[in-house]
Amino acid sequence: MSKKIFLRTFGCQMNDRDSEFVMGLLLEKGYLKAESPEEADVVLFNTCSVRKHAEDRAISNMGAFLKKKRRHLKIYGIIGCSAQALKKGLFERLPDLDLICGTGEIAKLPELIVKAFQEKIIAVGNINRPLPELKSTYRQGKKSTHVSIMRGCDNFCSYCVVPYVRGRERSRKAEDITSEIKDLVRRGIKDIMLLGQNVNSYKDKTCNFVELLKLVNDVKGIEKITFFTSHPKDATVKLFEAIRDLDKVRKHLHLPLQSGSNRILKLMNRGYTREKYLDLVTRAKHIIPGLFLGTDMIVGFPSESDKDFNDTLDLVKKVRFDGAYIFKYSPRAGTGAAGMKDEVSEDTKKRRHRTLLDLQREISKRKKHEKADRCHASHSLSR
Ligand code: SAH
Ligand code: SF4
Ligand code: F3S
């Protein structure tokens, strides 16, 4: 009888796409999808290492499953970013775990799972594997889907674990991307999100990100294109013009700010100042009518003072984002900031998180109303 697989995903869209890829490989090998971990023969968690809290929650969830484990009948594995970050340390934390598979080895999961029924397996080798390996035709969505255009990151923002767990930045060939998208269109998928940690630095031999957007926009049958994520240091006026001019591209830009303080931005190794950021979004808003602008911010980075935090509040008031994800800084082993002194207390992080969240909620609400009013006004005008 076919074995059943249960796969739970934590973390970002790139992890969602990796899970879909892994599921595709396993379905091709004859596995069936399990609806619950109880009915599965293989239970996998594809994990995220970007913040400690989320990482610990995934590991303790897995720990709870392992308590109920029926020996040798089931395989439990942790794959993805936490597997890559913690390596065999995961066996120390979860002695009954059967399989650890890092981000560079996921294409080998079918073989690794077979072996894991016999012995404990750990595969955390090459995180810089070339990309053509990561092909699988399985898609969960019937109408919309993710298309990975690159992998890894070279920016080494000092708080961030991603470059250490996903390796160096590698871009897929533009022709591979467009042929994948053409295939998706043939299967009825018309809404796609192009994925990369920093899509603006996409680079194929003949093609940069703006040119890639044009190629994708030209694919017959595609109706909606979004992309995720942009880095402010690589976002350009040409990109904003492309968003404005390309008819399938949604007028949506996610441009992580992280902090509004120049001192903290420098410590974070972000490569821009608050002035540059403000100038950039002012241009973006001017060029793209009706732009939806989103961002990420971190509070409580080491040594962040009240003045630094007030700089962030001030910039948020000036920019007026439509939406924002706000995180409390979480030190990650091996990153540049991990050894920085002057930690901000948990209480202060909580307070700043609350303050920034309240401010952003208020701005998001007002902007929504303003957009609705404008929409209403233009309807009245056109009547
Ligand atoms: N490549 C994307 C971000 C990937 S991580 C980019 O550059 O925008 C998603 C978000 O998690 C980041 O934008 C940042 O706001 C947050 N983040 C990353 N590392 C963090 C840490 N150590 N503590 C708290 N938040 C973090
Ligand atoms: Fe992390 Fe910075 Fe790379 Fe984004 S750009 S993944 S925040 S190192
Ligand atoms: Fe994504 Fe988390 Fe890995 S944000 S790249 S799943 S560390």
Image (cartoon, rainbow, N blue to C red):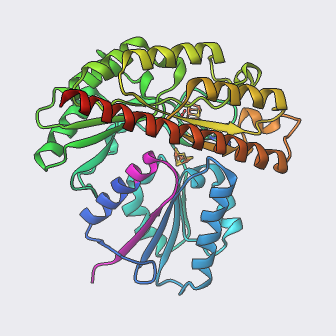
Rendered-image quadrant of the C terminus: top left
Q: Nearer the viewer, residue 122 or 367?
A: 367
Q: Please provide percent x and percent y for residue 167.
A: 53, 36
Q: Residue at x 28, y 79 (%)?
A: 2
Confirm whether the magenta stretch covers residue 92: no
Is residue 15 part of the magenta span, yes or no? yes
**Residue 228 as seen in the image, left or right of residue 357:** left
Report whether residue 272 is seen. yes
Vertical relation: 263 (above or below) 358 = above
* Residue 97 percent location from the top left of the image: 59, 71
Nearest the camera: 302 or 201?
302
Q: Residue at x 62, y 18 (%)?
A: 271
Q: Which residues are magenta?
A: 1-18
Question: Does residue 354 appear to the left or right of 32 in the view shown?
Answer: right
Q: Quadrant of residue 222?
A: top left
Residue at point 58% right, 55% down? 83
